Amino acid sequence: MEDAVNLPLPEAFLNFLHSNGIDPSIYTAIDSTPRFIRLKPGFEDYLEEFEAEMKCKLQKLEWLEGFYSLPHHIQIASSRAYQQGKVYGIDASSGAAVTALHISPGDHVLDLCAAPGAKLCMILDLVGDSGSVTGVDVARHRLAACRTMVQKYALGDRCRLFVADGTTFSVIPVGFHSDCISCDSESEESLDVFKEWTSRRPWKERKRASRCATPQLVSRDQPPELIYYGRHSGVVGLTKAELFKTASDNEIASLGYDKVLVDAECTHDGSVKHIQKFEHWGWRTLERRVLDAERTDHLHVLQANDSLFSYISPIEYLTGILIFISVPSLKPAYSDTNFIQIPKRISTDYEVNDELVQDYAMPNTKACIYLLV
Ligand SMILES: C[S@@+](CC[C@H](N)C(=O)[O-])C[C@H]1O[C@@H](n2cnc3c(N)ncnc32)[C@H](O)[C@@H]1O
């Protein structure tokens, strides 16, 4: 462990790392942070072309199908394979989280913190032609980026994207509407069925976007806003009333999503990389940008809400596994609620999957995947 006193990190951050037993040098050792790509299934033959173009050799990750590690300095965004949607930039930790969900073809998956969508794309690749993925995110601008990604990789056919707060989201899975839903009223609105989605943004959405000078987060009580749906996502042909109908207490047991992913915090390779950007921006700006009390309070409310309550809403819809990802974050140091402690509140229900964590964990980082079964 490098002598912490010699590191350029702000003192408050060093104290936080120290109290959580995290080696501070991982944040300054940019050269040793691993980088990964995933090949889109079916495009394995492009590996050699990609290596030749990037002038580097990729290392296959034996424990994670389709994943390869590459030298940290390689910028994949300029490669043809990336531009043509054959290669994803995605951390191995994200891949491990998705793998832990054991997704099978045909599963209906709810991704409650979906943007920007690396895991959602991987899940879409796994659910095949009979499953579906419902992606939800509280940040409209981030979910719009997710929509772009889903379209770039031509994966949107069985996908729906909702801007909504995951703690209150209650839209039922694809395919259950015809069995259980009866419209309350045959109003004109309810007869207005969803037609095939078009990339031309409706007038209402354009107006809303133009009103938002700053990125917008929706509030808990705002109704979900559908910003994308594929042709076979189960939306086309439904009325608005059918799509947004909430299940009754009796129906809830039979209307489960097969798997639910709650990724409110970054999987840890991601969070380490975010912090490392301050090596370029200047560590002094970490104080201003991240440790600023007002800003941190806002983040804390957002994250604490996720951490504490997200699993409550989806659990009603759950027939499979809920995976809850936790990583060390800045927030505990600046709030009363310690993020790391949260799983203890649900200690009777979870299993820590140590093996998976060890496979990809960077030294001294306490990342855990909690599986609620
Ligand atoms: C770590 S990122 C998710 C990364 C994503 N799963 C991926 O693989 O690309 C966390 C996301 O959670 C979203 N989020 C935070 N609070 C939320 C909430 N209450 N409901 C829905 N989304 C939320 C944030 O807007 C952010 O996009």
Image (tube, rainbow, N blue to C red):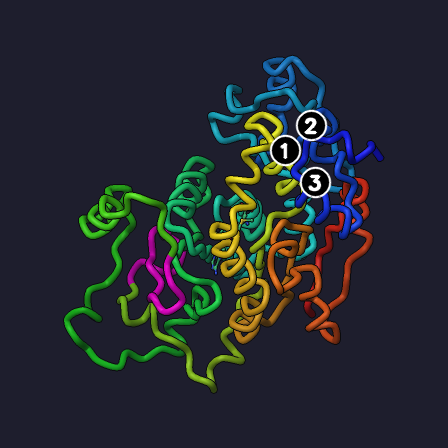
Q: Which of disc 1 and disc 2 is earlier in sequence?
A: 2
Which one is earlier in the sequence, the residue at label 3 or at label 1? 3
The residue under the point 67% across, 35% down is: 9
Q: Secondary structure at mark 3?
A: loop
Q: Position of residue 45 (x, y in %)?
A: 62, 25
At x 42% / y 78%, what residue is drawn?
247
Residue drawn 50% across the image and 59% down it: 302
**Residue span colored magenta:** 218-237
Q: Earlier in the sequence, mark 3 or mark 2?
A: 2
- Residue 231 shows in the view: no
Q: Amino acid at mark 3?
A: Glu
Q: Is residue 229 magenta?
A: yes
Q: Is residue 43 above or below residue 214?
A: above
**Quadrant of the rendering where the N terminus is positioned:** top right
Residue carrying label 3: 65
Do callouts 3 and 1 mark residues in contact (Cβ within 8 Å)? no
Give the CA separation, mark 3 to mark 2.
26 Å
> What secondary structure do most residues of the magenta stretch adopt?
loop
At x 60% / y 17%, what residue is drawn?
Answer: 49
